[in-house]
Image: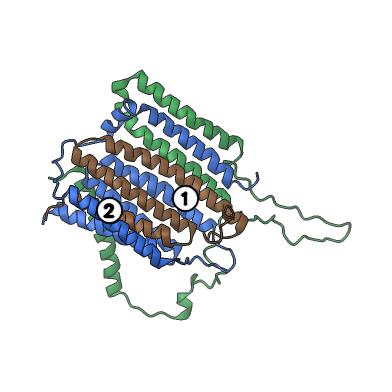
Chain colours: A brown, B blue, C green
Amino acid sequence: MPVTLDYYLLLSAVLFTIGVVGVLTRRNAIVVFMCIELMLNSVNLTLVAFSAYLGDITGQVLVFFVMAVAAAEAAVGLAIVISLFRNKQTVNIDKINILKW
Amino acid sequence: MELFDIVFYVFALITLGSACVVVFSKNIVHAAFSLLFTFFGVAGIYVLLRADFLAVTQILIYVGGILVLMLFGVMLTNKVINVKIKTGTMQAWPAGIAVSILAGLLAGVFYSNWKDAQLPASTVDATTHLLGEMLMTSYLLPFEIASVVLLVALIGAALIARRNR
Amino acid sequence: MLTEFGRVFIFLILGVVFVAGGLVFSWLIRPNRPYPSKLTTYECGEEPIGDTRVRFNIRFYVVALIFLIFDVEVVFLFPWATVFKGLGWFAFFEMMVFLVILFVGYAYVWRKGDLDWDRPTPKVPKYERGIGVREDHLMEEEVAL
């Protein structure tokens, strides 16, 4: 069985689903972050797969920007998590309900 | 089975297996380190898809930057006394049902339309200069905006994380 | 068909085989006679205190954050460097704009002192008149976070 486009797409779909499972079920804010990175990676994988399929480099440019934004997102997000930990002494997302009322 | 296919299966197995460890491991340090293997696996798949520059970028940004930052986050947010870095799960059943529906939909959408679509043979050898041309011509504005995004992220995150305000 | 990355892949396999082979071979031929003092962290007799996973100082995070942002900047430089010759001054000025914008952030973290690594200041022991009273803590303790 030669590896065709749908193999890459299936791999990406499964990776995305694993990420969604993590975001929905885990309590630790940093693990939730890691799962978001998994989802970003799976979307990047789809873009690169279609870029190779269509012979168009545009998808790779988009992935490049996604990576830059992911770096910015990780920096700010983890800073917020650390700031929350400093004030509330926990990273459990059940306990962080300060914006909820 | 060709060598190319075997390599694909190996990288796919590494990616998915370590992603499962990230999600289901109770130890957050194990999760962080297995995320490393996920990133490496995805980089390998990029190489198979002839995106050589992106594979290297994946290693540089994700493994060299984001993962290090996450490990610092782990180290910074555990209690000094009574070290407890195990993390629990919640609402596993509703989440499982929702996710299985999502997985079916995603797989169905992908599988029906592009089944047995062969990837065309390699046309270009290196993508770095093609990316550079795109960045300097068609995607010039996003390129400059990316620097603004990075600037805002740097200032904002440094401001939030700093101890003495 | 051995592409450039094919060679990298061969190196990858060779590296894994080399390390795994060494570990397995040494595991097969070494004697295994553990006793309690051999299993301590420092076999010389030093008792480890506390846990390995202590909380880090927040400044490590800020430095890692600055590194990450400039890591991304460097990655943006690579594709530019390959086309710079063909596009000439236009590409040069575009990259200068990019770099100047990020330099503002660099100047900011420098100005705010995130790059300074202030050491814990040693406290000089104060002596009462006549009788030497030493303070217990010579070094000001650093509070994490």
A15 with respect to B155 (left or right): left
- Crowd band around label 1 with a 10 angstrom C-alpha radius: few (<14), some (14–19), many (20+): many
Q: Position of residue C101 (x, y in %)?
A: 48, 29
Find residue C115 and report its image quarter.
Answer: top right
**Residues marked 2 and 1, same chain:** yes
Q: Is residue C5 left or right of residue B102?
A: left
Residue B2: numbered disc: none
Q: In percent of the image, x 48 and y 45: which residue is there?
A: A75
Kind of residue sitting beneath label 1:
Leu
**Badge 2 element:** helix
Camera-side mark, 2 or 1: 2
x and y, in percent, of residue B110 in the image:
23, 50
The quadrant the N terminus of chain C occupies is top left
Q: Residue at x 63, y 48 (%)?
A: C119
Quadrant of the rendered image containing residue B23: bottom left
Decide: is B135 above or below C49: above
The location of residue C55, given as percent across then percent down, is: 56, 59
Residue underneath mark 1: B69
Left or right placement of residue B54 versus residue C37 in this view: left
What kind of element bears circle 1? helix
Q: CA distance from mark 2 to mark 1?
A: 31 Å
Query: Which of disc 1 and disc 2 is earlier in sequence?
Result: 1
